[in-house]
Amino acid sequence: MATTMMRTLSTKREKYRHCKLKALSVMLAITCSFFSVSATIPLKQVVKDITYLAADNLKGRASFSPEIDQAANYIAQRFADIGLKPLQNNLPLSKAPINSTVNSKDKPALFLQTFTINQIQVQTLNMVLNGQEINPEHLAIATTIEQLNWQLGNAQSHVINKTDNLRKALTELNQAGGQHLVIINSAHAKSFKAYQNYFNRGLTKLSLEHRGAIVMVLSDENQIENYAVNASAKITKQSLTNVVGVLPGIESPKEIVLYSSHYDHLGITDDGKEIYNGADDDASGTTAVLNLAQYYAEKGDNKRTLMFSAFTAEEIGGFGSSYFSQQLNPNNVVAMINIEMIGKPSKFGAGTVWMTGMKHSNLGALLNEKLIALNTQIYQDPYPEQGLFYRSDNATLARLGVPAHSFSSTQLDKDQHYHQVSDDISSLDLSSMHKVIELLATATQSLVDGAVTPTRIDKTQVATQGKIY
Ligand SMILES: [Zn+2]
């Protein structure tokens, strides 16, 4: 790829403005050096960043662990060194655009976007149905309510028969919200168990604005004559942190191109002996975000505002991107380039990348226009059956209409390392990864320049999230 051939401006924005003025007034633009600094994406820095993020001493960057804070501090320090600007006090961009007066170089903490989430753990659950006490093994609950004391009529009741689609039914109730009692035929025992295990681990919610509950009972009863359900749950607050930095646009500062990744991963194994380093997932994407930030900061000619975000808590439900999406006006985000697992060659070859949800906007087509001359392209997601469009942070912004897609090179159908302790740096092809970062820089240049604006995503075509779990 031809990064070294790219025409680049001086690192100093002032110089650009000075050039522009001159060009306008005396048409002497030629006296300004447009070629003084050649921005590149050095492989050495790429290796340095991913080596830090995927190292054993970060213990798999689990949400809520002290080690994830160490990773956040590293990213924040890099943003500071690169010269990005922080968002002011985490206020929405529309209210307090960009904190450009503060010298953030010595204050990396300004890049930390810290927020709280609610962890809900069920303490007690018991039920009597038609006069019969239900075995606790046949009960499960997902709730955002601390105390439940239901009697006949307090909840909507539903019966899932042998031939009904349990998953579909529960998804619909979850999307509707409210309070539901669901009697599930024992033919669904296996799926019931899976839901029970999932709910028993506890739920995490960014907001408790929707208070609802779904109580599931494994039983072959199909008449509900009376019932009593008593349940209690403990809700505790915990804090999480995104890392967000900005390069203000020279011509259209309100138009944002967002580059993102998630920097959290799965932590350590239950026995504490092994580490999920998450080198590919998603230290690779976070390394890309850092190096794209550095590249564009060096170029210094971005007409639109570039925002760089390393999200927390993707692996446990996308809470980082959810919080982030509430801190700015999504209508200002022209495109979201979410980078996920680019550490190994895709099925299309080393240095190639594909994107999720291509049909939802024309972003892919616009980026590919830029790549024709290079005889390459961004491919369509080759694993549509995996639903990857919904399995990363882009989905949150896509639901708000942003042309938000994930860019990846994982061969997910046969990736032996996916969510395994073997996803460490030795499993990666760093040269391929470096090429993907360069490719993304080239492909997205027209977004950065304000030359193209992708179509918005039709929100009605994007599946909504559940209210309760
Ligand atoms: Zn993952």
Image: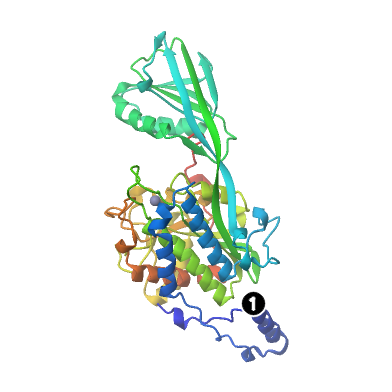
Query: Is residue 223 left or right of 178 when viewed as pictured?
Result: left
Query: Is residue 334 left or right of 428 when viewed as pictured?
Result: right
x and y percent of residue 59 in the render?
40, 53
Residue placed at 58% from the left, 85% from the top? 34
Res 86 quadrant in image: bottom right
x and y percent of residue 287 in the render?
45, 64
x and y percent of residue 242 in the render?
54, 54
Residue placed at 58% from the left, 43% from the top? 116
**Where 76 sits versus 272, above or below?**
below
Whether residue 258 is visible, yes or no, is: no
291 and 69: which is toward the camera = 69
Looking at numbered disc 1 in the image, what kind of residue is underneath it?
Arg
The residue indicated by pointer 1 is: 13
x and y percent of residue 234 in the render?
52, 29
Q: Residue furthest right?
A: 25
Quadrant showing the N terminus:
bottom left
Q: Secondary structure at mark 1?
A: helix
Query: Is residue 333 left or right of 50 when viewed as pictured?
Result: right
Residue placed at 51% from the left, 32% from the top? 176
Q: How is the image coloured?
A: rainbow
